[in-house]
Image: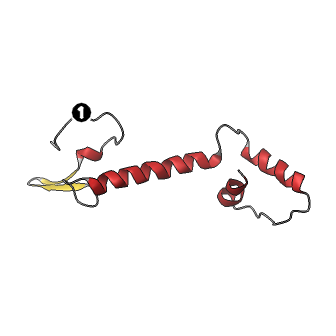
Amino acid sequence: MIHEWAAISGNYLPESPYRPIGLLGAILRWHGNLQAPPGAAERARDAERAAVRAAVDACPVCDASGWIELADGLHRCRRHLNFGADQRFTDNA
């Protein structure tokens, strides 16, 4: 929580604060709801991006950007649409 206060909001975090309890109070006020930390959403977005990137990298059908070149032009690889959802198709059709 202290790291998020310094990293996300860009606040200065002294090594030995003049009033440590006041600093802790400011961090707790900034943080607000302890059940939903501000950095949790950013970590979830990063994890989702990494999972999609890994799926695209592992796909034998599409290129590194997730596109397939077909006779009628470029198409987004369907294997990566709604990544993580129940995908009931077996081919890229």
In front here: 82 or 16?
16
Mark 1 packing: few (<14 Cα in 10 Å), some, or many (20+)?
few
Q: Position of residue 11 (x, y in %)?
A: 74, 61
Residue located farthest toward the right when viewing the structure as drawn: 18
Say what secondary structure mark 1 lies in.
Answer: loop
Q: Is residue 39 left or right of residue 70?
A: right
In this figure, what is the number of numbered marks?
1
What sort of colour scheme is used for the picture?
secondary structure
Q: Residue at x 49, y 53 (%)?
A: 46
Q: Is residue 24 left or right of residue 9?
A: right
Q: Residue at x 28, y 54 (%)?
A: 58
In front here: 18 or 67?
18
Q: Position of residue 78 (x, y in %)?
A: 24, 44
Q: Position of residue 8 (x, y in %)?
A: 65, 57
Q: Is residue 44 left or right of residue 24?
A: left
Q: Position of residue 84 (x, y in %)?
A: 36, 40
Quadrant of the rendered image containing residue 67: bottom left
Tell me the quadrant of the picture where the C terminus can be found. top left
* Residue type for callout 1: Arg
Q: Is residue 45 left or right of residue 1?
A: left
Q: Residue at x 23, y 49 (%)?
A: 77
Residue located farthest toward the bottom when viewing the structure as drawn: 15
- Relative to residue 89, is residue 66 depicted above or below? below
Q: Residue at x 42, y 52 (%)?
A: 49
Which residue is label 1 attached to? Answer: 88
